[in-house]
């Protein structure tokens, strides 16, 4: 089904792969009649060409990218614009789309959600942007329909910003990276490696894009094969896939931890642009006659079977056939993994979902940027037409990804087929994906064609003794399960004729409701600021010496951004930095906030003129000054902050708040064995936090929760571009040396850390 090359590989004329090795050169010469160096062939990827076009550094090893367009939604754009305003923003220099698809229900917190929407509308008018009202479209569907273009680059403040299937290299990053683009700065990275995804064959009937995506994620997530690299989809199998199918695979590449994606384009993508009245945005994209990839993923589409990703990660995937054949063993293994993910805070069971030897689920959801596409919903409607989902616990909800899709489903009768079965069809909304809609009952299992199934991401709260969970599946198998009234069923197990109706896009829907400034600013427009919208608190520059207190210690193999700052109802407070910070690590370490605030209070007092010697840090400084090397250290000039340790933090969402909440609470650093994603590490840096690395055994750390770490000369080490920083664990009256890596930092990133945050760096 899926295999990985051990070495790099050459793609010849778009259809034949030659893996790097002893005979590669002779084989390439045989096929092409000439020899192409690896360095030259690496320039033949589509990714290289697009990055070269958008790079302004003049150096293709050290990229400085300027994007064509930006997009954000209503739990990110307030913080982004507030940051940019504090840094001197006067206009949106490139098209910037503000969608409202996350807090669009306006169901909690009084007026705060709609206040954010009015903030967005007023900013679109003032700075020259585009505003998409609630329920019109989820962020990524609007971008596909109205923003994407072959050879273009789009940056979004949502991790699933992926439009590669439409020939657009798109990246999801934390808000500060969008702030840089708004201030006409650049996105700075080393030239990423490019991994080919070579597709052959044609999917069997009943297999959908989520099945292919989950199989891919399973193959590459744990081994890091594509981490922070660009995936380039090529091979003869691509042509067998519709545009919607490709989009459904592409959006899920985020869960592989790749940086971005790009696909070859053809007549099916040309037709997509024509249907959406943007034919001028199409151009054919193909790699060069000889293109070199740093690795190759082989996918035989004909062998992909219906998949299910069990709780609590998209990579915890099995074929539905395999799950059924080994049901109790797999469920037992999932329960054991849950003991780690949930820290034993609640009882968790899946085996009790087995009824008469069959797995029963209580809920089905087809939604959002992954599941809410036209073809997914039409196929699901074909499966369930004339059937009943039953009147027991099982429910089915369907969320078309945009109002134009909803309209077409109404016109072609698929909406009636769904509703007639007992399914509920709702408006465009991202809530089921991040825990702000359709939270299941306690102990319930939901099957969803959405993007993630992390612990509690569906909305349950460990701190309240609640636990429900999500398994990811394709819309077709969800519909098949619904037709069997909640008993797990693969779409390949049923006989159905798919009608595959043609899609017609009605552009008047957006023309009648979306505000588009056409890039024209209105300087006289007043920004609407609701009472929950707060400015970022002041943050000081990095001092020469610092003392960190470890206030949380996490030893899970991977820590998601959902665990660092929960999604769901907390999203309503993302316009209020201090209010949101109260939820930091609440599902993982409820004591974290209190500990961090204690350190923050001492630091605030120090800045105000009080001596930290009169606080809990008194004995720490006594130990430090007893060492003759540091006898001259002045505690009043030594920055104090908190830090957390996690093995591999930052998987999942691009949300900057996973870092900014720590900073608001007085955090000065993270310590990790490695960082799960580039975007989380960038968020730390942009908020002035040190992304420290400790390479030792995480089971035998020289520091523990509650310990203090003294790092002398830290500012000088950053200025001098040191790759390592020497610190000292202060414990039991002794200093124990501890060496931390700092990782690669650009000159701008070093300046941002030294200044204390991106706002300070840009403040005018």
Image (tube, helix red, strand yellow):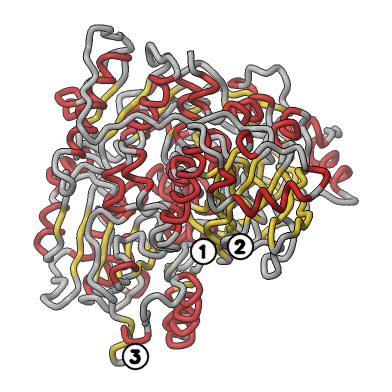
Q: Which residue is mark 3?
A: 357
Determine whether 723 is above or below 219 in the image.
above
Spot occupied by residue 546 in the image (x, y as percentages of width and height): 64, 41
Q: Which residue is mark 2?
A: 222
Q: Which residue is mark 1?
A: 315
Element under disc 2: loop
* Number of dots carrying numbers: 3
Give the mark nearer the N terminus: 1 vs 3: 1
Pick the residue in front: 686 or 169: 686
Q: Residue furthest front?
A: 614
Q: Which residue is at a point 54% across and 58% down the rendered structure image?
A: 216
In the rendered structure, the answer to whether residue 108 lies left or right of residue 706 reads left
Q: Is residue 159 visible?
A: no
Spot occupied by residue 554 in the image (x, y as percentages of width and height): 55, 63
Determine whether 517 is above or below 386 in the image.
above
Give the mark nearer the N terminus: 2 vs 1: 2
């Amino acid at each position: 089904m899926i295999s990985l090359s051990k070495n790099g590989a050459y793609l010849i004329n778009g259809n034949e792969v030659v893996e790097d090795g002893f005979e590669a050169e002779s084989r390439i010469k045989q096929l092409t009649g000439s020899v192409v160096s690896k360095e030259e062939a690496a320039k033949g990827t589509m990714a290289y060409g697009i990055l070269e076009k958008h790079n302004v550094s003049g150096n293709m090893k050290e990229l400085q990218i300027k994007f064509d367009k930006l997009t954000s939604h209503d739990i990110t754009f307030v913080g982004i614009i507030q940051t940019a305003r504090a840094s001197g923003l006067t206009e949106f220099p490139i098209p910037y789309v503000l969608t409202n698809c996350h807090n669009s229900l306006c169901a909690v917190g009084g007026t705060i959600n709609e206040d954010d929407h009015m903030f967005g509308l007023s900013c679109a008018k003032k700075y020259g942007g585009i505003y998409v009202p609630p329920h019109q479209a989820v962020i990524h569907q609007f971008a596909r329909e109205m923003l994407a273009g072959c050879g273009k680059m789009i940056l979004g403040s949502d991790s699933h910003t992926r439009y590669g299937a439409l020939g657009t290299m798109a990246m999801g990053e934390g808000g500060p990276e969008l702030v840089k683009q708004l201030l006409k700065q650049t996105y700075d990275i080393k030239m990423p490696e490019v991994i080919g995804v070579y597709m052959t064959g044609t999917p069997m009937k009943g297999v959908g894009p989520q099945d292919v995506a989950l199989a891919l994620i399973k193959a590459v997530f744990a081994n890091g094969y594509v981490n922070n690299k660009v995936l380039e989809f090529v091979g003869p199998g691509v042509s067998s896939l519709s545009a919607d199918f490709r989009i459904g695979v592409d959006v899920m590449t985020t869960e592989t931890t790749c940086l971005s994606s790009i696909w070859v384009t053809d007549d099916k993508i040309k037709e997509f642009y024509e249907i959406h009245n943007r034919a001028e945005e199409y151009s054919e994209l193909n790699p060069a006659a000889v293109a070199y990839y740093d690795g190759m993923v082989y996918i035989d589409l004909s062998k992909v079977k219906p998949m299910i990703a069990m709780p609590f990660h998209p990579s915890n995937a099995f074929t539905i056939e395999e799950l059924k054949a080994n049901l109790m063993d797999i469920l037992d293994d999932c329960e054991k993994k849950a003991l780690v993910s949930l820290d034993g805070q609640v009882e968790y069971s899946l085996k009790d979902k087995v009824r008469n030897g069959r797995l029963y689920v209580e809920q089905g959801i087809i939604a959002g940027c992954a599941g809410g596409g036209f073809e997914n919903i039409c196929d699901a409607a074909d499966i369930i037409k004339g059937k009943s989902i039953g009147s027991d616990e099982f429910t089915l909800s369907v969320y078309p990804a945009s109002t134009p899709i909803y309209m077409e489903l109404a016109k072609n009768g698929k909406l009636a087929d769904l509703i007639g079965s007992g399914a509920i069809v709702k408006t465009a909304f991202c809530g089921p994906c991040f825990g702000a809609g359709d939270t299941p009952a306690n102990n319930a299992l939901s099957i969803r064609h959405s993007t993630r199934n992390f612990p509690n991401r569906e909305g349950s709260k460990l701190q309240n003794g609640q636990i429900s969970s999500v398994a990811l599946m394709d819309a077709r198998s969800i519909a098949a399960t619904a037709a069997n009234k909640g008993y797990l069923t693969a779409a390949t197990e049923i006989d159905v004729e798919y009608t595959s109706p043609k899609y017609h896009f009605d552009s008047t829907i957006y023309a009648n409701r979306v505000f588009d400034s056409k890039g024209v600013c209105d300087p006289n427009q007043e920004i609407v600021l609701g009472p929950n919208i707060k400015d970022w608190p002041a943050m000081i520059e990095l001092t020469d010496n610092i003392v960190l207190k470890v206030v949380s210690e996490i030893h899970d193999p991977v820590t998601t951004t959902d665990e660092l700052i929960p999604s769901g109802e907390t999203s309503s407070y993302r316009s209020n930095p201090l209010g949101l910070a109260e939820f930091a690590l609440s599902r993982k370490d409820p004591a974290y906030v209190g500990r961090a605030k204690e350190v923050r209070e001492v630091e605030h007092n120090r800045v105000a003129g009080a001596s930290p010697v009169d606080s809990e840090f008194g004995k720490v400084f006594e130990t430090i000054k007893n060492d003759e090397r540091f006898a001259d250290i002045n505690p009043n000039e030594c920055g104090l902050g908190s830090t957390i340790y996690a093995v591999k933090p930052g998987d999942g969402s691009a949300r900057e708040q996973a870092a900014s909440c720590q900073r608001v609470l007085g955090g000065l650093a993270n310590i990790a064995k490695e960082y799960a994603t580039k975007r989380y590490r960038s968020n730390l840096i942009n908020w002035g936090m040190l992304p420290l690395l400790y390479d030792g055994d995480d089971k035998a750390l020289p520091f523990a929760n509650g310990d203090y770490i003294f790092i002398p000369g830290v500012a000088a080490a950053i200025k001098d571009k040191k790759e390592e920083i020497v610190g000292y664990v202060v414990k039991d009256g002794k200093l124990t040396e501890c060496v931390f890596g700092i990782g690669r930092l650009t000159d701008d990133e070093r300046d941002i850390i030294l200044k204390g945050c991106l706002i300070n760096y840009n403040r005018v």
